[in-house]
Amino acid sequence: MNSAIYPGSFDPMTLGHLDIIKRAAKMFDHLTVGVLDNKAKNALFSVEERVSILKEATKDLSNVSVDSFNGLLVDYAKQNDIHVSVRGLRAVTDFEYELQIAQTNRKLSDGSLDTVFLTTSLEYAYLSSSSVKEIAAFNGDISQLVPDFVVDIVHNKLKNK
Ligand code: PNS
């Protein structure tokens, strides 16, 4: 089976992420959205919450599943027989960081895990999870940035922090 993983922090997922998921799902038999369980990063949402949001957002995409992983991406990919990692590129500023991760993963996996880049749709080129959190923290409108059901989840989370 031609499988791929779309790894990330997804704290929280945005419409930009969903755009990449939908496009990648058309290219592969199966796409796993892999949520990094990184205790070192001070995430707003727990890994369980991030997985649950992604599951709801992708429930109509029959070849997409959502899972979490900790440790190295190459180890998760090897355990699950996945040989392609999908990442979105928003602008040239993303490129240097993404190139470094892609080369590192290829080296660490002895060439078994390659990276495919999808250029983010122009309407989401400016969008990031960090900007969603910042806008919401100042009571701004995030309804154009995240799926509808995520708007209140983000505002409530920030209120109860
Ligand atoms: O959404 P993000 O935070 O840009 O995603 C980064 C992610 C999760 C893709 C990357 O940090 C990752 O794969 N981390 C897992 C640890 C790992 O494999 N590191 C080696 C590559 S530098």
Image (cartoon, rainbow, N blue to C red):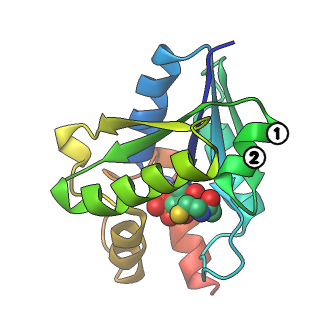
Residue 137 percent across, percent down from the top left = 41, 81
153 or 76: nearer the viewer: 76
Q: Residue at x 53, y 45 (%)?
A: 106
Instruction: Look at 17% across and 41% down and name the residue there.
Output: 122
Q: Amino acid at mark 2?
A: Tyr
Q: Are the two marked residues, 1 and 2, in contact with CB atoms closer than 8 angstroms?
A: yes
Q: Residues within 10 Å of mark 2 (few under 14, many from 20)?
A: some
Q: For residue 10, say whether it is visible.
A: no
Instruction: Examine the image and state in which quarter residue 65 appears.
Output: top right
Locate residue 78 relative to residue 126 in the image: left or right: right
What number is the disc on residue 76?
Answer: 2
Q: Callout 1 environment at 10 Å: few (<14), some (14 to 19), or many (20+)?
A: few
Query: Residue 80: x, y in percent?
Result: 79, 34
- Seen from the viewer's position, the closer of residues 36 and 103 is 103
Q: Amino acid at mark 1?
A: Gln
Q: CA distance from mark 1 to mark 2?
A: 5 Å
For this rendering, which residue is in front, 149 or 76? 76
Q: Split into 4 quadrants, where in the image is the C terminus?
A: bottom right
Tell me: residue 11, above or below residue 20: below
Residue identifier under label 1: 79
Q: Secondary structure at mark 2?
A: helix
Q: Is residue 135 visible?
A: yes
Q: Ligand 1 near label 2 (Cβ, under 8 Å)?
A: no
Q: Which type of secondary structure does the marked residue at label 1 adopt?
A: helix
Looking at the image, which residue is at 43% across and 44% down?
A: 87
User: Which residue is depicted at the point 45% across and 49% down?
Assistant: 102
Q: Quadrant of residue 9?
A: bottom right
Q: Indicate the position of residue 16 as horizontal and vertical percent values.
A: 36, 45
* Closest to the observer, 56 or 128: 128
Q: Residue reaching furthest bottom?
A: 161
- The percent coordinates of residue 130 (x first, y second) are 39, 71
Q: Is residue 42 above or below residue 154?
A: below
